Structures are given as structure tokens and as C-alpha cells.
Image: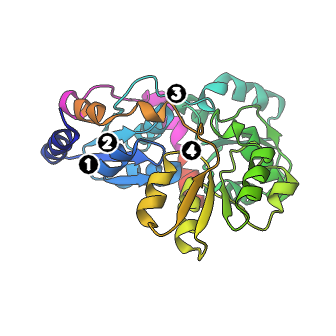
């Protein structure tokens, strides 16, 4: 079946079933193009909570669909592909959080949204890369804080806020390969370009990179916003490949250079147009968080949305 026909059927089924398609920036361009909303983790979580749709087709990885299920427990949340994991979410369990809490009963746990619902249920505050600094600053310097699971984002927050935290040793398998040498090499090749870097990157706590006048650290949504508002014409993009699609659509007169051709999230790329259609047709691959976990996880997610 050609993409044009698949898209036609998807649109018909969305109307017939009161369904909405949410897509992350890292999915395939054709998946982004059929989405009702495209965003990063924070934006997608908000949209999942605000939608009046009966069915949410979540084009992203599994923890994102779980978050949507927690926020909207009365809606059917479908993920159009299986084995859509995340190296960050898979690096830590609820038991790991419990063990830290047992040793630090007065401490607070801040979990990046890239975690399972089970971990969020043990968490005091969730955050995304968009609002991680605000969440940690909200807690202040007097609290013992455990930040999990992204060591790079955690180290970046420590640098930016001066607030010491215990950091879990997890990383994003895509952003971990974006190191300081890669940034410096690209800066030398393109001296006039702004370098837009995701704070999950390996170089996120390197003072030499943080102090570069043309280097900026942002969430994916922040990268897109900077490019739209800047007068610059050339940008090095240090995040996942899929982000280029929205950047190039919104700014056809500007040049976007990917930091490395292998910054690709294989899990995100599992979501295909055919899978979206099948999810709507068969209402398969439903993601439903057990009520006991959902009832405990919602508090940390709501705090994230309030501070965001």
C-alpha cells in the first residue's frame, strides 16, 4: 500500500474513532507529518493530559506511552510498534530508588521523564530536559537530591545550578556518543555556525564546551526554538537525526548540519506509517499502567507539569 493511501485511511480512522496521533521529534519524517501534535517529552505529556480524544496513538518509545497512560488513565493509549525501549529507562528500577531512599530517608528523588512508570511511582519529582534546572532549583540547595537516570543531564544541572546531587550512572545511547572532541571538530569546520546541543550529550558538563560562545544547550523543543529565532544561517545540530525534519521545514533558508550521521534512535525509528494504521485498525499494542503504580506515579508527573 502506498503512503498516500495509508495516510488517507489513518485520517479516516482518527475521525471515526476520535483518536489523536502524538509523535516525538525523533520519529520518521512521514510519521511526524501525520501527527496531530509533534513535540518533546514535556510537550507530549502535556498534550496527552489535555486531549479530549478517546484513543491516543503514541509515536515514540514505551516510557512515553506509559506516561500518557498515567496522565490519561481513562483513555486507550496505543504504541504502533513493539520493542521501543530506551537505554535510560532500562538502566534503573523502582528497587534501585527504594535502596537509595532507605539510606537517605530525608532525601528527594528527581527522575528524568525517561524512566518507567514503576520508577516514577518511587519518585518525588519528574522532570524533562526542558525544565530539569527549574525543578532542581525549586527544591533548593538544602535538600539531599538523587537525580536519575541520566548522568550527563544530571552533571549539566549541577554545573548550571551549583546544587550537588547524587547521580545515577545511566545514559542515552544516542547522545552519549556526542563528546567534546566531536563538538570542537565541528566548530572548527563551521566557525560561523551556532552549535545546538542536547544536555543528554556526553559533553554536557565540559567547561570548555559550556563556555564556547556559539554553543547552546537545549531540549529538542529548545533547539527548534533557537533556530527559528536566530539570525544565523547555519547550525550544527547535536541531537537525534529526526529533529532535522522540523528544523528544515520551518527554516528552509537555513542550513542544518547533523553532528554525526549515526545519532539515530533505533527504537524511535521502529514506528512506521503502516504501524500507525494497524494500531488504529486493530487497537493493538495498548499500553496500560497498573492502577496501583499509576496512582503513585501521577504525583511526580503532575509536579513536573506544574513547574514546567
Q: Identify residue for label 2.
A: 56
Q: Residues within 10 Å of mark 4 (few under 14, many from 20)?
A: many
Nearest to the eye among marks 3 and 2: give it: 3
* Of the pair 180 and 32, the residue shown nearer to us: 180
Q: Identify residue for label 3.
A: 85
- Asked whether 83 falls inside the magenta stretch, the response is no
* Of the pair 118 and 285, the residue shown nearer to us: 285
The image quarter containing residue 296 is top right
Residue 92, visible in the rendered structure: no
Q: Earlier in the sequence, mark 3 or mark 2?
A: 2
Q: Identify residue for label 4.
A: 240
Dot 3: element: loop
- What are the residue bounds of the magenta stretch? 280-298
**In the figure, 35 relative to 215: above or below?**
above
Mark 3–mark 1 Cα distance, whole angstroms, equals: 25 Å
Nearest to the eye among marks 4 and 3: give it: 4
Q: Residues within 10 Å of mark 1 (few under 14, many from 20)?
A: some
* Of the pair 126 and 296, the residue shown nearer to us: 126
Q: Identify residue for label 1.
A: 53
Q: Earlier in the sequence, mark 4 or mark 1?
A: 1
Nearest to the eye among marks 3 and 1: give it: 3
Mark 2–mark 1 Cα distance, whole angstroms, equals: 7 Å
Residue 279 placement, left or right of 25: left
Q: Earlier in the sequence, mark 3 or mark 1?
A: 1
Q: Residue at x 29, y 49 (%)?
A: 34
Q: Are marks 2 and 1 in contact (CB under 8 Å)?
A: yes
Where residue 287 sits in the image (x, y, percent)?
38, 29
Where residue 48 sits in the image (x, y, percent)?
39, 48
Nearest to the eye among marks 2 and 4: give it: 4
Q: Residue at x 55, y 58 (%)?
A: 256
Amino acid at each position: 500500500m502506498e503512503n498516500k493511501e495509508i495516510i488517507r485511511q489513518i485520517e479516516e480512522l482518527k475521525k471515526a474513532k476520535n483518536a489523536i496521533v502524538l509523535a516525538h521529534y525523533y520519529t520518521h519524517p512521514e510519521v511526524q507529518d501525520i501527527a496531530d501534535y509533534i513535540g518533546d517529552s514535556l510537550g507530549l505529556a502535556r498534550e496527552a493530559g489535555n486531549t479530549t480524544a478517546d484513543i491516543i496513538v503514541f509515536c515514540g518509545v514505551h516510557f512515553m506511552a506509559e506516561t500518557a497512560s498515567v496522565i490519561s488513565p481513562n483513555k486507550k493509549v496505543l504504541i504502533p510498534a513493539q520493542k521501543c525501549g530506551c537505554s535510560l529507562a532500562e538502566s534503573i528500577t523502582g528497587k534501585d530508588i527504594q535502596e537509595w531512599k532507605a539510606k537517605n530517608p530525608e532525601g528527594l528523588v528527581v527522575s528524568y521523564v525517561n524512566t518507567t512508570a514503576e520508577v516514577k511511582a518511587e519518585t518525588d519529582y519528574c522532570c524533562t530536559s526542558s525544565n530539569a534546572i527549574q525543578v532542581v532549583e525549586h527544591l533548593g540547595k538544602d535538600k539531599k537530591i538523587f537525580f536519575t537516570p541520566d548522568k550527563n543531564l544530571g552533571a549539566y544541572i549541577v554545573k548550571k545550578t551549583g546544587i550537588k546531587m547524587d547521580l545515577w550512572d545511566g545514559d542515552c545511547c544516542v547522545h552519549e556518543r556526542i563528546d567534546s572532541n566531536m563538538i570542537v571538530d565541528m566548530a572548527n569546520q563551521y566557525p560561523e555556525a551556532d552549535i545546538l546541543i542536547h544536555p543528554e550529550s556526553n559533553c554536557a558538563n565540559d567547561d570548555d564546551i559550556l563556555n564556547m560562545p556559539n554553543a547552546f544547550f537545549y531540549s529538542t523543543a529548545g533547539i527548534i526554538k533557537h533556530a527559528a529565532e536566530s539570525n544565523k544561517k547555519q547550525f550544527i545540530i547535536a541531537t537525534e537525526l529526526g529533529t532535522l525534519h522540523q528544523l528544515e521545514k520551518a527554516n528552509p533558508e537555513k542550513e542544518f548540519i547533523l553532528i554525526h550521521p549515526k545519532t539515530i534512535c533505533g527504537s524511535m525509528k521502529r514506528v512506521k506509517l503502516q504501524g500507525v494504521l494497524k494500531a488504529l485498525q486493530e487497537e493493538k499494542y495498548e499500553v496500560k499502567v497498573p492502577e496501583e503504580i499509576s496512582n503513585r506515579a501521577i504525583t511526580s508527573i503532575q509536579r513536573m507539569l506544574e513547574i514546567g
